[in-house]
Image: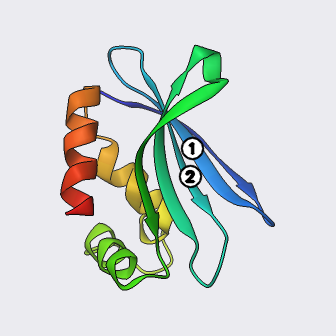
């Protein structure tokens, strides 16, 4: 089971949450404020968090990004954490128990 860290919000920059997979891999899920809706990213943290490997990046201002956000938030209660871009992405990944499954979910979202 994925260990979900706390949600951190910076009113100017956006928000992020760190997830730890069963194998010890750490993911950083973030929602950056840029443009109207911003950007959602998922990255694997490496070297004690000093570098990262991007797994998923999506501009929510693009038509593709709006479709991704609609898929992520389907069934979410309006105003809830799961209805936000960050909460929806964390919710999508919380059942992943391996990095391979996270990569697969990210590919599915992008396609």
The residue lying at 32 percent from left, 45 percent from top is 93
What is the x, y in percent for residue 19? 47, 34
Q: Which colour scheme is used?
A: rainbow
Which of 102/46 is in front?
46
* Disc 1 to disc 2: CB gap under 8 Å: yes
Label 1: how many residues lie within 10 Å, few (<14), some (14-19) or many (20+)? many
Q: Where is mark 1, residue-wise?
A: 17
What is the x, y in percent for residue 5? 55, 35
Q: Where is mark 2, residue-wise?
A: 30
Tell me the quarter of the image containing the C terminus.
Answer: bottom left
The answer to whether residue 11 is above or below residue 7 is below
The answer to whether residue 62 is above or below residue 48 is below
From the viewer's perspective, tell me whether residue 104 is left or right of residue 11. left
SS class, disc 1: strand
The residue lying at 27 percent from left, 61 percent from top is 110
The answer to whether residue 98 is above or below residue 6 is above
From the viewer's perspective, tell me whether residue 39 is left or right of residue 88. right
SS class, disc 2: strand
The residue lying at 48 percent from left, 39 percent from top is 43
Per the rendering, the mark at residue 9 is none
């Amino acid at each position: 089971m994925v260990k979900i860290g706390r949600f951190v919000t910076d009113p100017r920059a956006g928000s992020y949450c760190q997830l730890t997979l069963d194998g010890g891999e750490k993911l950083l899920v973030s929602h950056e404020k840029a443009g109207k809706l911003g950007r959602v990213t998922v990255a694997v943290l490496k070297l004690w968090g000093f570098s990262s490997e991007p797994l998923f990046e999506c501009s929510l201002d693009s038509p593709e990004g709006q479709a991704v956000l609609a898929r992520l938030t389907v069934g979410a209660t309006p105003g809830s954490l799961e209805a936000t871009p960050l909460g929806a992405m964390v919710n999508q990944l919380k059942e992943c128990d391996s990095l391979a499954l996270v990569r697969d979910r990210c590919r599915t979202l992008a396609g």
